[in-house]
Amino acid sequence: MGFAAQLPAAGGFLEQLEAARSLEDLQAVSEALRAHYGVDHLVYHWVSASGEQYGCGTYSPDWVQRYIEKGYLRIDPVVQGCFQRFHPVDWKRLDWSSKAARAFQKDAIAHGVGNQGFSIPIRGPNGQFALFTVSHSCPDEDWAQFTALHRRDMILMAHTFNEKALDLEPGRRPEAAQPLSPREIEALTLLAVGYSRAQVAETLAISEHTLRVYVESARFKLGAMNTVHAVARALSRGLIVV
């Protein structure tokens, strides 16, 4: 196996995170953790509603720059898929079926990201969204063994990274969202249960143009990047129930 499978819990790294005073300190811990677990990469990634990205990790500068230049944030099945989830997910369980997703995956592997990945969605205050990810190149069986063994530690690390990032960057915290109107709640609820936009408009007896106005208003209030993100945030805050 290419990485360390039988390592003790990373308690010492939690102490290092608690002592961090800058993004550079978080970067140093991410690099130490990568070496500790023997994986190709380890990344903490905070995505704002406007698409701004902040964090630390071990991806190559060339890949980070390419990711930004290509606008991969809106294609990346890991980011898009984790918007809709609240639990850790293996990348193999995400939707890579589209042509754009497959091209993105090929490009990522070519830049050394790895063919395996495990990401933990993090929901912070006022709809904050971040990801903690480990990735590697290895067979499926080895990766399944690794993630089963270290899942609990990874979850703990993910939330500790996020708490420290919030402490270091209080100005990045999303503002508290404005309350949704009854129509906005109805629209997001129907979208959440799988209705198409046409079906939602018909059910609410409004035009699709009017529906678009409601959805965009809700998206703005929730600080969401797109409709799927808006639905995920509304669900996570208990504003809609499905």
Image: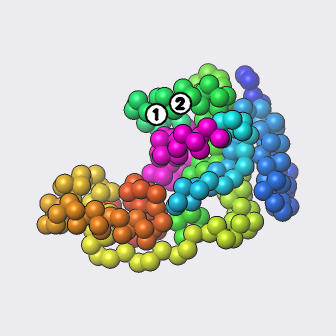
In the image, residue 153 sits, relative to residue 231, either above or below, namely: above
Q: Residue at x 51, y 32 (%)?
A: 104
In the image, residue 151 sits, relative to residue 234, either above or below, namely: above
Q: Is residue 168 left or right of residue 68?
A: right
User: Is 81 one of the magenta-colored residues?
Assistant: yes
Cα–Cα gap, marks 1 and 2: 6 Å
- Can you say which quadrant of the picture contains the C terminus? bottom left
Amino acid on which disc 1 is placed? Ala
Is there any visible trace of residue 76 in the rendered image?
A: yes
Q: Quadrant of residue 123?
A: bottom right
Q: Residue at x 44, y 77 (%)?
A: 178
Q: Residues within 10 Å of mark 2 (few under 14, many from 20)?
A: some
Q: Is residue 135 left or right of residue 89?
A: right
Residue 143 % position (x, y): 63, 29
User: Is 220 one of the magenta-colored residues?
Assistant: no
> Which span of residues is magenta-colored?
65-90
Closer-to-camera residue (127/71): 71
Closer-to-camera residue (15/51): 51
The residue under label 1 is 101
Q: Quadrant of residue 107?
A: top right
Residue 223 % position (x, y): 48, 66
Which mark is on residue 8? none
Q: Quadrant of residue 48?
A: bottom right
Amino acid on which disc 2 is placed? Gln
- Can you say which quadrant of the picture contains the N terminus? top right
The residue under label 2 is 105
Residue 120 % position (x, y): 59, 48
Q: Residue at x 59, y 56 (%)?
A: 52
Q: Residue at x 32, y 64 (%)?
A: 215
Is there any visible trace of residue 147 in the rendered image?
A: no
